[in-house]
Image: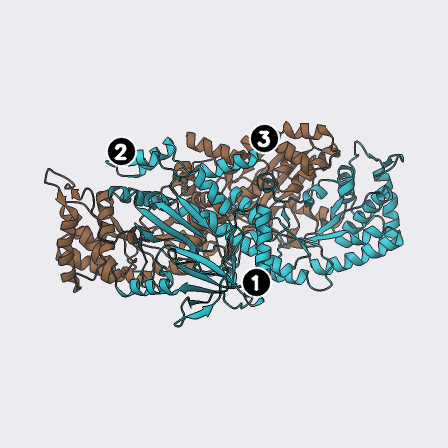
Chain colours: A cyan, B brown
């Protein structure tokens, strides 16, 4: 895909998207003769977001793109030189010019995996100087992607599998790329699609759209369509004048609903007719520009029925204000009575889309038993993650020159687990994740069916479990999305629930536990 | 600036960064023969963010870039065609291929202006089809930029003019561009600089950095610097072996502080020495990798004093955990006693930088009377705007073909003010903004000193005021930043305060008030 490559180039061409201290530290390493020391970093989070017991890992494809294209251009190096001491050895800048990630190894959870506190999302190994430089970009690429995927997964859990969820948050995101990231990873997390066209073009996210109030209010009713004639959907019948037919149907609809034929707004009706002429196979209406029941709905019905007479079926209507659940119930009733009255049975199943500040609480209301809402558009709440707008990932040095490293700060939560590690997800007999096991890379892998003694993080006693390994290749976005849903389906309900969930266990192997103990007792290594 | 142009091209090359419904509406307008109808849109917000009484407008430079470069490439049009009905008239796609913004007029508040609810931030006029397509990108470019600028301005108001505020939030932003936008507009809103190197390169934001824990923990103390010799800062004295000198100074410092010389971590000290060898003129330390008082501070002092003996002055230290205010007080005391003990008076004034989840409340604590904190680094709280993560701007059609348009929804807050308008900021005798006046574009401008009857929004009675016009050309980022601070300085304290502020008034002219009345009474125009 050329467009994808193009986007890749755009995103990846910015190695200066980093904190200045990465560069000053790079000079420090270089001056200390340590640029090529082999280092192992881990990227992880310390607490699950939103008070839940899980997160979804996302952003790996962006990280891989970034690493593949990582290269400092002359202009970049010149800019860095302007921020470093004037007597800096020119050989340092030569070193920067030659940097790439060909010596860097990236290990990661599969995109869309369930992820838990302290378990590495990424393990990055390579020359100390370059893997240090990667810290900020990798945190930037993983943190928000995983946060919004997790947020979307929560909203999907609330909505259940049947309702369609559309992400509409581009205009509420942190600028263009925030919007692109949000659309991509809310799809990965379980949404059905997005309004964001660029996410469709660059990432293959299904895109969807309705129409806006400005389209409705741009019509006064005095406009004359240049081509008002519409041919039937099938067959050879004559084309009809759609506005004229709509006028006839409006009278019938108003009589059926007990409304005066002057009440529905003529501009709104003209807008619906214009949309129907452009999209006869996919007519939809936005009903709340004036009054839903006295204007939007009768106008919609008049156009939908006129189209129906020609063999076209309206696909949906949207509500963007007021009590969305109650209105959907009322409208479904009117759709049903109108369908029966005019013998157009398809009309009663027209899709009802709602939007307007839908958050977790309102979503739960909208999907309650018996709700007539079919599609829910969510913008701000999915994109900005207002319950917790950042995941707080960290990128910590765990090993350098083969020697384990540990940050022994007085803030216990900020202490790190030392050593290059392997992580395993142990499954229960029924396939649910039982716990995640962290062990040293050199320890033998746990074997399915074989008993194992492990130390749950923070526990004083070990416990005994039986393991199964988790290992997948990098899949497509749609595959990652399906994988995320399967993973969530396998997670025990106690961990999956959004309110007061039971925490999922992450455990250390005996040897890792022993290493932590030995590094914690002496202040020096 | 080539780099700036480059970034401009990157950001502006994405006309598909829009909601799909803009494209379906475009086809609707085109099919209705209305693509070229002259339309006027206004972009505004309905409520000030964060419970305050003001916002800062930002993002104009990005909007101007976007409009200048707006053009659909063949691949873009092909992608859109794949999402529209297969029988769509090819002439529509030809029309899209030829689109640009040469017929679009953009009027805006000056970048960095105070902004208030309902007053247009942008007024966009031009052919209906193209100005409709611009809705989502403009909302995306203005919304977050203005939100984060306003957030930064609040943090600056809390911090007062003296403390240095650094934005460190790149890793917590919504992907790469979210980070770039955050760094740019938190600077505009009143921060002193950012850690984001790309914001320095592309936008001229001052960049700053310290060092990270991974740099400290990467050293064990067994490393041997390849070039341990350091020449004096000035003069012709002999170079000295810095690590050896530091060792001597460590003994003196530990004796002064009553610590055992084995207590400070040797790896941390080696890291400080490595940093000092790379940055003798700009040495700084991060003190909380192990223990601030028993390791970080004595190691820092030993290196700073060894450098001091050679005529170099350490520039700062940073704390990233624990009670930041209390630690800063204690450390200042130790800096003072150590400066006196070793007769290096500059040492007592070393800058203390703090970071670690600083929000509005913690910031107020850190800048209280007598605080020894000099620089405050803020990441998550400035970048994600957790108090309110989106501004909620809207883009509304107010006039088409010269006819005023009004959205008369049943949700009163979502009603729009009709007509193409002019906005004026009326100043009080002392230069403070008194109120903002919205009037119809064709009304004569208010004149300074001349009485005027206006209708405060939502009020039942008019009031009488005397005006002064506001009008500035598009300034540089630094000028916009200064302008924002001046504007905030002129705002009355009652509106500026962050808790329970008095709302600033936005008023309608008599004619605009009359137009609202006439459009509200009849449901059709």
Label 3 crowd bin: few (<14), some (14–19), many (20+), radius 10 Å: many
Q: Which mark is residue A431?
A: 1
Residue that label 3 marks: B71
Residue B25, by quadrant, is top right
| B361 on left or right of B66 | left
Camera-side residue: A211 or A315? Answer: A315
**Residue at the bottom extreme of this rendering:** A461
Rendered residue at 54%/33% (across/down): B13
Q: Determine if residue A358 is in view.
A: yes
**Residue A243 on image: x %, y %:** 83, 39
Quadrant where the N terminus of chain B is found in the figure:
top left
The kind of secondary structure element at disc 3 is loop
Residue at image location 78% in from the left, 46% down from the top: A314
> Position of B311 compared to B99: left or right?
left
Q: Secondary structure at mark 2?
A: helix
Residue B361 x/y as whole percent: 41, 61
**Disc sitting over residue A90 in the figure:** 2
> What is the spatial separation of the Cα atoms under label 2 and label 1, in whole angstroms?
57 Å
């Amino acid at each position: 895909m050329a467009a994808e490559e193009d986007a890749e180039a755009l995103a990846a061409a910015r190695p200066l998207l980093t904190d200045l201290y990465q560069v000053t530290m790079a000079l420090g390493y270089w001056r200390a003769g340590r640029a090529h020391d082999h280092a192992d970093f881990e990227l992880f989070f310390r607490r699950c977001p939103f008070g839940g017991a899980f997160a979804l890992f996302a952003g790996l494809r962006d990280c891989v793109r970034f690493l593949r294209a990582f290269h400092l251009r002359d202009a970049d190096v010149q800019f860095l030189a302007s921020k470093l001491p004037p007597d800096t050895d020119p050989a340092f800048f030569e070193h920067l010019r030659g940097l790439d990630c060909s010596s860097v190894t990236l290990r990661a959870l599969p995109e869309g995996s369930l992820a838990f506190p302290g378990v590495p999302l990424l393990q990055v190994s390579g020359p100390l100087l370059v893997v240090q430089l990667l810290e900020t970009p990798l945190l930037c690429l993983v943190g928000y992607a995983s946060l919004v995927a997790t947020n979307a997964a929560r909203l999907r859990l609330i909505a259940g599998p049947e309702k369609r969820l559309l992400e509409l948050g581009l205009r509420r995101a942190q600028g263009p790329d925030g919007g692109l990231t949000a659309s991509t990873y809310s799809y990965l997390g379980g949404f059905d699609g997005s309004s964001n066209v660029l996410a469709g073009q660059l990432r293959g996210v299904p895109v969807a759209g309705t129409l806006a109030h400005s389209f409705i209010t741009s019509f006064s009713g005095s406009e004359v369509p240049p081509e008002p004639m519409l041919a039937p959907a099938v067959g050879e019948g004559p084309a009809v004048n759609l506005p004229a037919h709509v006028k006839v149907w409006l009278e019938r609809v108003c009589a059926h609903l007990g409304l005066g034929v002057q009440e529905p707004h003529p501009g709104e009706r003209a807008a619906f007719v214009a949309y129907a002429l452009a999209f006869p196979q996919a007519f939809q209406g936005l009903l709340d520009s004036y009054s839903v029941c006295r204007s939007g709905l009768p106008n919609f019905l008049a156009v939908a029925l006129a189209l129906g007479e020609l063999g076209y079926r309206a696909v949906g209507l949207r509500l963007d204000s007021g009590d969305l659940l109650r209105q959907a119930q009322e409208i479904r009733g009117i759709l049903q009575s109108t369908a029966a009255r005019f013998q157009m049975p398809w009309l009663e199943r027209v899709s009802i889309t709602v939007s307007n500040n839908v958050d977790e609480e309102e979503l739960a209301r909208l999907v309650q038993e018996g709700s007539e809402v079919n599609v829910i558009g969510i913008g701000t709440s999915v994109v900005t993650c207002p319950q917790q707008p950042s995941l707080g990932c960290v990128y910590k040095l765990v090993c350098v020159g083969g020697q384990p490293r540990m940050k022994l700060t007085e803030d216990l939560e900020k202490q790190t687990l030392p050593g290059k590690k392997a992580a395993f997800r142990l499954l229960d007999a029924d396939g649910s994740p039982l716990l995640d096991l962290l062990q040293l890379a050199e320890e033998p892998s746990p074997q399915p069916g074989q008993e194992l003694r492990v130390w749950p993080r923070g526990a004083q006693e070990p416990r005994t479990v039986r393991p199964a390994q988790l290992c997948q290749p990098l899949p497509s976005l749609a595959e990652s999305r399906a994988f995320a849903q399967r993973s969530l389906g396998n997670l025990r309900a106690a961990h999956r629930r959004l309110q007061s969930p039971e925490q999922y266990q992450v455990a250390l192997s005996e040897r890792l536990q022993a290493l932590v103990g030995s590094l914690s007792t002496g202040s020096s290594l």
